[in-house]
Image (tube, rainbow, N blue to C red):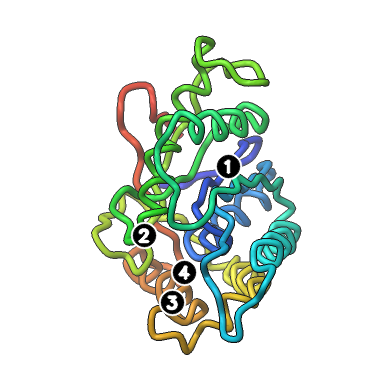
Amino acid sequence: MKLNFQQERILAVVAHPDDAELLCAGTLARAHSEGATIGICVLCQGDKGQPKPPIHNLTEVRQQEMQSAAKLLGADLFFGESPDGVLFDSVEQRLILTEVIRQFSPTLVLAHSQSDYHADHRAASVITEAATWFSASAGNQTQSSALNKPPVLWWLDTVNMTQFEPHFYIDVSKFVDIKLAMLNCHQSQLQRGTDASFSPLQDLMLQQCATRGAQSGVSAAEAFRSHTAWKRCAAW
C-alpha cells in the first residue's frame, strides 16, 4: 500500500509529551513533507515524570520541551492539561478534545491503542475514539461548530510493540533523524535513562522503528491499525 498525505490534516492525540516522538513522529514528518497540515494534542501535563534531581516546575518545562519538538515539525500544538495518572474518560475530557478536533478539523486522527501499557494511554484512546465521533455531532455543543463528518481514526503502535498486530506500516526511513531531534527536545525525560522504572527513550524508539522496518522490508517504519467501525474508516 502506497500512501500520499498531500492536502490531509493529521492530528496526533497522545497522553504525554514525547509519546508522539516515540510512536508517530516519522509519519507526521513524512506527511508534512508531502504537504499535509500537522497537529499534536497532548492530553496530560507530564508532571509526574520526574528526573533526578527533581524539577520543581516540571509541567512548564515539559510544555516548553513539547513546543520545541512541535516547532521542528511545523505542527500546531494543543494541551489538554490533565495531571498524569488521573486521565479518564469523562464528559469534561470528551468536550475538551472535541473542541480541539473541531478547531483543527483533521481528516485523520492518530490515537493510542487501547492495548497500550500505560493507563493514561488507554484512557486517551477511549476519549479520542469518542471525541472524534462526537466532533461531527451538532447535538454535542462546544465553542466551535460541528465538523461535516468525523475524521478517519488510526490506532498507534504500542510502546515496545506489545499486544499489537499491525494492519499496515508507514515507511519513515527518511525521517528517523527528525524523530531523534524531536525526542532530544525532551531532556527532562532523557535524564531518566538510569531510572529502573523507566526505559532509555532513544534506544526504545530506534529499536521499535527498526523492528517495524524489518517486518515491512524497509530500514525504519511505524505501525498502525485502522479503526474499522462503521463510518470510521476510509479508502486511500
Marks 3 and 4, how far apart at CA: 13 Å
Q: Position of residue 138 (x, y in %)?
A: 54, 11
- At label 3, the amino acid type is Leu
Where residue 87 appears, x then y in whole percent? 45, 48
Residue 182 relative to residue 162: left or right: right
Per the rendering, the mark at residue 11 is 1
Residue 26 seen by the camera: no
From the viewer's perspective, is residue 188 above or below residue 7? Answer: below
The residue type indicated by label 4 comes to Ala
Relative to 142, say whether 4 is above or below.
below
First in sequence, mark 3 or 1: give its number. 1
Q: Nearer the viewer, mark 4 or mark 1?
A: 1
Toward the front, the furthest residue is: 56
Residues under numbered marks 4 and 2 in contact, where contact means CB atoms less than 8 Å apart: no
Q: Which residue matches tag 2?
A: 118
Circle 4 is placed at which residue position? 220
Quadrant hosting residue 100: top right
Q: Is residue 181 left or right of residue 173?
A: right
Question: As rendered, which of 163 and 195 lies closer to the eye?
Answer: 195
Q: Which residue is mark 3?
A: 204
What SS does tag 2 mark?
loop
The residues bearing labels 4 and 2 have C-alpha atoms spaced at a distance of 24 Å
Q: Residue at x 63, y 29 (%)?
A: 105
Q: Distance of mark 2 from mark 3, alpha carbons?
A: 15 Å
